[in-house]
């Protein structure tokens, strides 16, 4: 897996974290000024050298897109 944090593929309404990993990256407080919070959360995970996995949850969850 490439180590470049800009090659993160985190996006969407369901991003799940282990509590320790979420705290290690500073949580949402660390990215409060960033409009693309989902992308930046993934980048922070990679910068910290933590593991992440991308799953297709389209058969498990359903969300309503916002305008």
Image (tube, rainbow, N blue to C red):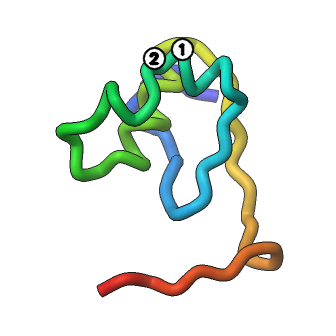
Q: Position of residue 44 (x, y in %)?
A: 44, 25
Task: Please report whichever mark, 1 or 2, sits nearer to the chain's N-terminal start.
Answer: 1
Please state if 46 lies on the left or on the right of 67 as rendered: right
Q: Residue at x 67, y 26 (%)?
A: 19
Quote the CA–CA distance across marks 1 and 2: 11 Å
Residue 19, compared with residue 16, is above or below; it is: above
User: Depth check: 26 or 50 in front?
Assistant: 26
Mark nearer the viewer, 1 or 2: 1
Residue 12, compared with residue 37, is above or below; it is: below
Secondary structure under badge 1? helix
Q: How many marks?
A: 2
Q: Residue furthest right?
A: 60
Question: What residue is pinned by disc 2?
Answer: 47
Is the residue marked by circle 1 packed among few (<14), some (14-19), or many (20+) residues within 10 Å? few
Question: What residue is pinned by disc 1?
Answer: 24
Q: Residue at x 53, y 25 (%)?
A: 45
Q: Position of residue 6 (x, y in %)?
A: 37, 34
Q: Residue furthest left?
A: 33
Q: Residue at x 18, y 38 (%)?
A: 33
Please state if 20 lies on the left or on the right of 47 as rendered: right
Q: Residue at x 71, y 40 (%)?
A: 53
Quadrant for the N terminus in the image: top right
Residue 34, compared with residue 65, is above or below; it is: above
Query: Answer yes or no: do the residues labelled 1 and 2 have beta carbons within 8 Å?
Result: no
């Amino acid at each position: 897996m490439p180590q470049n944090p800009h090659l993160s593929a985190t996006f969407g309404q369901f991003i799940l974290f282990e509590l320790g990993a979420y705290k290690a990256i500073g949580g949402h407080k660390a990215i409060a000024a960033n409009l693309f919070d989902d992308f930046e959360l993934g980048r922070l995970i990679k910068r910290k050298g933590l593991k992440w996995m991308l799953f297709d949850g389209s058969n498990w969850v359903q969300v309503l897109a916002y305008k």
